Amino acid sequence: MPNSRIFTNKITTLDTLENLNLAMQSGVTPLSDSFKSVDEFFPETYRLDMVSDLVKFLNSSNEGLWLVKHSNSNQGRGINMVSDIAAYKQGLLTKKDKWGDTPSESSTQKAAQKLEE
């Protein structure tokens, strides 16, 4: 099926919806009678592989349950539920590899540490 990747890949779907939202807000795409923004039917979403979104998420005061899914996993693998953003942030700062060693710092860990300063 042509263009099926747009809806079968979570990052591509998110990018497509962000572009639609920008087009709706700028008037390029006419506003729907039903929806004025993508935010009305798509839940608040952060790409934790992007430092700017990670910072927004870690500073979020939104309480509730979050689903964290790695961008490189599929078919339901790698999904974690996060109810405490502060604990998630602390986990990023103290993350260890499978041997118990602290791995070299990832960009995610570096961003989390910058927030601590």
Image (spheres, rainbow, N blue to C red):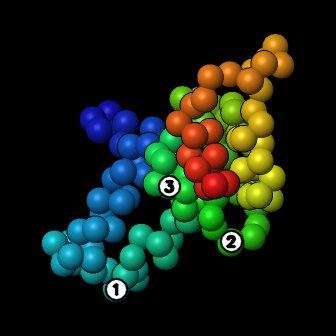
Q: Quadrant of the C terminus?
A: bottom right
Residue at the left extreme of this rendering:
28
The amino acid on which the numbered mark 3 sits, given as a three-letter code, is: Asp
Which one is nearer the viewer's eye here, 5 or 90?
Answer: 90
Measured as percent of width and height from the top left, residue 77 is found at 69, 31
At a point 20% along the width and 72% down the height, the residue shown is: 29
Of circles 1 and 2, the one toward us is: 2
Toward which corner of the image does residue 80 lie, by quadrant? top right
| 23 lies left or right of 106 | left
At a point 51% along the width and 41% down the height, the residue shown is: 49
| Marks 3 and 1, the one that precedes in the sequence | 1
Q: Residue 62: which numbered mark, if any?
A: 2
Q: Residue 53: which numbered mark, if any?
A: 3
Q: Is residue 99 above or below residue 53?
A: above
Measured as percent of width and height from the top left, residue 105 is found at 60, 29
Say whether marks 3 and 1 touch (CB < 8 Å).
Answer: no
Measured as percent of width and height from the top left, residue 48 is found at 55, 46
The amino acid on which the numbered mark 1 sits, given as a three-letter code, is: Asp
Q: Residue 33: which numbered mark, if any?
A: 1
